[in-house]
Amino acid sequence: MSRPGPHWSSLAKLMPSYRALTAVSVGNGRTTAFWLDSWLPGGALSIQMSSLFSHVTSPDVSVAHVAQHGLDGGLVPRLNRAGARERGLLLPIVQSLVLSEEADARALRPGCAKGTDLSSVGVYQLCHFGGVGAPFANFIWTSYAPSRVRFFAWLLVQARIHTRDVLLRKHIVEVAEAGCPICSAPLKTADHLIFTCPFAQQFRASVGATPTVSTVKLLHLMSPPGLVPPRTGPAFLLLCCWQLWKHRNAVVFQNMPPSLPRLLQLCREDAVPHPPPYYPQGRCRCVDSVPSRLVLHPPPLLPPSLLVKKKLYM
Ligand SMILES: [Zn+2]
């Protein structure tokens, strides 16, 4: 069998975008990918049931094939707990599938563009849609906090860090294990970690941060302590959240007792990192008593060699 030409390879590369932009109304199910196409209201099963999908042996199998041969023939013999649960949810859907003689009908996903007819204009508009800026994006990505802290904060403000409520939702812990390991509150959420946990409240009082908001979604609206320069306020708040998270991890994974003095000491140490070679003064430098008077200096200018490199790619 000859190898497919470059035009087929180019078309194949577009398939993920094509599937992401379209939804299918199933007729005979022959041209609809069971796992990869959006043919159920919740979207593609590969995303909605990602645990079960990781056990699939033929990801491109059609809806018609699964309706005829069943679900289990395309799965590995042994499923993990999350996969077995998702299989239990999916089986009734497969068993109730009723196919017709009509061809499958594909259209742009509802809400993606004006109208639902699949057209090159609609696809072009969707591909060039700039999206909506998150209100907390500048707060995080323009702060002087280290990259690892900014990535953590990006997940934190969307309540996507692995707090116990998220682990419970993913069936990684049971209800009895979902409480706060520090204060024994029944459910540990990102809001609890940063705002409502008594330990977090003590920490905030120690660093002089007044809680002007009560949810991580609005962290970008929180005011830093008055002693922190405005330009470094976001970095200060993000570093405080990061240290709270690290302290919580030490309690959970290293069986260390909750300790406010230890947390404050970690803040002092983290505020003066080892300077990277191209930041001779250090990216974040703490002066005076930390953290109540934490001062973060902005990074100095990059050395000429890096500036030249940057220009080449502009
Ligand atoms: Zn707590």
Image (cartoon, rainbow, N blue to C red):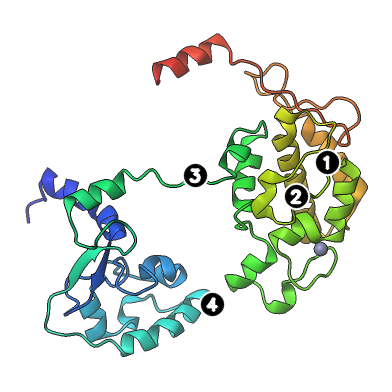
Q: Distance between the residues labelled 4 and 3?
A: 37 Å
Residue at horizontal 12 percent and vertical 80 percent from the top? 102
Which is more N-terminal, label 3 or label 2? 3
Question: Ligand 1 quadrant?
Answer: bottom right
Which is more N-terminal, label 4 or label 1? 4
At numbered mark 3, what does the secondary structure look like: helix, strand or loop?
Answer: loop
The amino acid beneath tag 3 is Gly
Q: Is residue 118 above or below residue 308?
A: below
Image quadrant where residue 55 sits: bottom left
Q: Write down the residue under mark 4.
A: 81
Disc on res. 246: 2
Tags 3 and 1 in contact by the CB under 8 Å rule?
Answer: no
Relative placement, left or right, of 310 versus 279 is: left
Which is more N-terminal, label 1 or label 2? 2
Q: In this view, does 10 lie above or below 273?
A: below
CB at disc 3 and ligand 1 closer than 8 Å: no
The amino acid beneath tag 2 is Lys
Q: Distance between the residues labelled 2 and 3?
A: 29 Å
Classify the position of the N terminus by image quarter. bottom left
Q: Write down the residue under mark 3.
A: 133
Residue 214 point in image, percent of width and height = 74, 56
At numbered mark 2, what does the secondary structure look like: helix, strand or loop?
Answer: helix
At numbered mark 1, what does the secondary structure look like: helix, strand or loop?
Answer: helix
Image quadrant where residue 178 sits: bottom right
Residue at horizontal 77 percent and vertical 28 percent from the top? 229
The amino acid beneath tag 1 is Leu
Classify the position of the C terminus by image quarter. top left
Q: Distance between the residues labelled 3 and 1?
A: 34 Å
